[in-house]
Image (cartoon, rainbow, N blue to C red):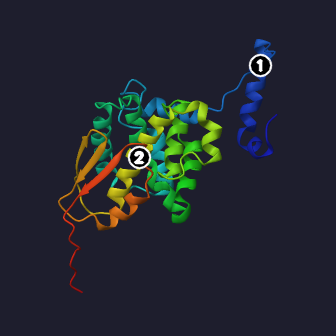
Amino acid sequence: HIPKGRFDTIREGTLIFQKILNFVNAKEVITSGVGVREGVFLNYFLKNDNLKFPKDINPSIISILDRFKTHSIHTQRAKNSVSSIFELFENSKYRLKKKYLNTLLNTIEITPIGYTFNIYKSYQHAFYATMQEFNYRVTHQEIILTALLLRFGGKGLYEKEVYKKYKSLLPSKKELEILSFIYSICTALHENSSIKNFEFSLNKSRLIIKAKGSLYLAKEKLKEIERPNGIDLTIIDNQILPDYNF
């Protein structure tokens, strides 16, 4: 069955296709949603790259950001902070699995898309867009984890029906708490301060954040973040309010 909206654009091709089916006496045809035109384009576009996108490029993320026009100046800095904090938890008693780092980095990249729709519903919009559009070189588990990290925003982690729905595909509760904690810490720091670099350390169960400037705005956001059981947070900053001359 060919939809009316498509028939006028492929009418000539269907006649040729029908002739081929009759010639080979085909009884059944299995089709794919992959576009031939897109395939031809990618075959030409990637001919010098072994028909593969470079490892550091995810077409899904680039497509999402381009369509929603939401490239953020904070992204690379936030990714650096995520990597630093993740390494602390990976090499500590928490033993966070290395495989989750890439998911956190992808989550940071996709974070700004929610603001295109409505800043007050940014978590929900980012969740829906990610579930529908984020699909290149990732597993179903990675898609869901990325979307839920965006959706929770560090608050109400286990009170949401959406968490219960996908629980079987998610990491353990302890791992998810720490991943959400790391993600929320980094977005709060970089979205609410102009400081480029932070110094992170983990002293037993206390995460210490040092900054050479003031974090007076970021501190308010950090207070709202749910902390994993037993983990404390210490912030060491300049504590001086900026002085403006108007």
**Left or right: 191 in relation to 30:** left
User: Which amino acid lies under the numbered mark 1 shown in the image of this protein?
Assistant: Leu
Question: Within 10 angstroms of label 1, few (less than 14), some, or many (20 or more) residues?
Answer: some
Query: Tag 2: residue type?
Result: Phe
Instruction: List the residue tagged with mark 2.
Output: 181
Q: Which residue is mark 1?
A: 21
Q: Residue 39, image x and y in percent?
A: 54, 31
Query: Which quadrant would the N terminus be assigned to in this image?
Result: top right
Q: Looking at this view, name the residue that lies furthest to the bottom.
A: 246
Q: Is residue 112 in view from this perspective?
A: yes
> At which x and y percent is residue 174?
46, 36
Any part of residue 135 in sight: no
Which quarter shows the C terminus? bottom left
Circle 2/circle 1 CB separation < 8 Å: no
Question: Compared with residue 214, is residue 76 higher up or lower down, i.e. above or below?
Answer: above
Depth check: give the residue in front, 43 or 55.
Answer: 55
Q: Which mark is residue 232?
A: none
What distance separates the C-alpha of mark 2 from that of mark 1?
57 Å
**Which residue is located at x 58 percent, y 43 percent?**
131
Who's the residue at 31% across and 41% down the image? 205
Q: Is residue 231 above or below residue 115?
A: above
Question: Which of the two residues, 183 or 133, is positioned nearer the viewer here?
Answer: 183
Q: Residue at x 29, y 46 (%)?
A: 207
Residue 132: image x %, image y %? 60, 43
Q: Residue 188: which quarter of the image?
A: bottom left
